[in-house]
Amino acid sequence: MRVLIVGCGYVGRPLGAELARQGHEVFGMRRSTLADAELQAAGITPVHADITEPATLATLPPNLDWVVNCAASGGGGPDEYRQLYLHGNRHLLEHLAAAPPRMFVYTSSTGVYGQNDGSLVTESSTTEPDSETAKVLVQAEQMLLGAARTQTFPAVILRVAGIYGPERGYLLKQFLRHEARIEGHGGRYLNMIHRDDLIGVILAALRNGRPGEVYNAVDDQPVSQLEFFTWLAAKLNRALPPTVPEDSTAPRKRGLTNKRISNQKLRTDLGYGFKHPNYQSGYSAEIQRLDVSGR
């Protein structure tokens, strides 16, 4: 297969490396040339373009079989989100319209779910978030799903939970720096996925996903703040973080939510089996990696 990965960074680069290892011809799209050597070493052909600038997409290779858009915002507010996720996907749709790929996978976010009552959330649950950035993500999804319905564009959407893994793990880093806090009674649920599993899920979606469908990319076990930090404190033989009042007005890019996200559809439809089905497995692997590396 000829594969284009849009946003060849934390997720896209190891995804591309795995696809290249499997024998696919992989193109990695980034705005700058800074990572060209690393991409080439991983068997990925660098392509320079910017999905927020449609004229630059003329440099993309033709006759693509698979396209993965896992471009990620480094920050910013609704305007930046709109440029990258809404307009960026629209520009890709327009560019690919003349010769659509066999599969187009877009990594959205579980932030589109605004539930705040600890309820179980599935792909059919409402997507009515409060935060403006999450509302943009809903709009981007609706555009792609509309193209799947009316233009037979082969879009599959993965709603990705909090990603952790090598060099990334906000909660673990906070804990190690003694900056972690348990909010209120610690009952708010966290939903996560290890980067290795997200890569596996994307591969499964490319092979087995159904155009026009949405899948929650999240591990098997939502966990409360208190349960997570209690486990982590015992694992590292450290004190439990202090408790602070829950502040619903604290700035969070995609809003404050509290829900338990189900991955049953992902497991059933895509047949994916997790390497790290829960936080205990994934964070144990990361803690071991940190110990081995001496960090």
Image (cartoon, rainbow, N blue to C red):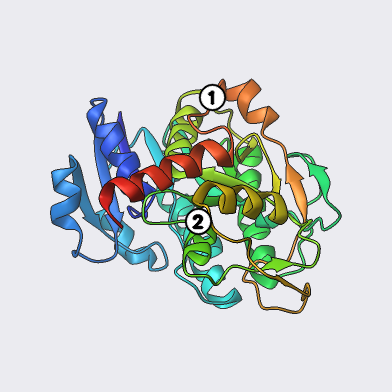
Which residue was labeled with disc 2? 89
Numbered label attached to residue 219: none
Query: What residue is disc 1 on?
Result: 272
Mark 1 or 2 closer to N-term?
Answer: 2
> Residue 5: x and y, percent?
35, 46
Check the image and report above or below for 38 versus 16: below
Q: Quadrant of residue 3?
A: top left
- Could you classify mark 2 by the number of other residues whose Cα lies within 10 Å: few (under 14), some (14-19), or many (20 or more)? many
Disc 1 residue type? Tyr
Where, by quadrant of the figure, is residue 244 drawn? bottom right
Asked whether, in this view, residue 142 is left or right of residue 101, the answer is right
- Helix, strand or loop under label 1: loop
Nearer to the camera, 62 or 235: 235
Q: Secondary structure at mark 2?
A: helix
* Residue 145 in view: yes
Q: Is residue 248 above or below residue 260?
A: below
Depicted 210 relative to depicted 293: above or below: above
- Could you say which is closer to the camera, residue 222 or residue 22? 222
Q: Is residue 156 visible?
A: no
- For the N terminus, the quadrant is top left
What residue do we see at 65% from left, 69% from top?
181
Left or right placement of residue 102 versus residue 258 in this view = left
Q: Nearer the viewer, mark 1 or mark 2?
A: 1
Q: CA distance from mark 1 to mark 2?
A: 26 Å
Residue at 27% across, 54% down: 294
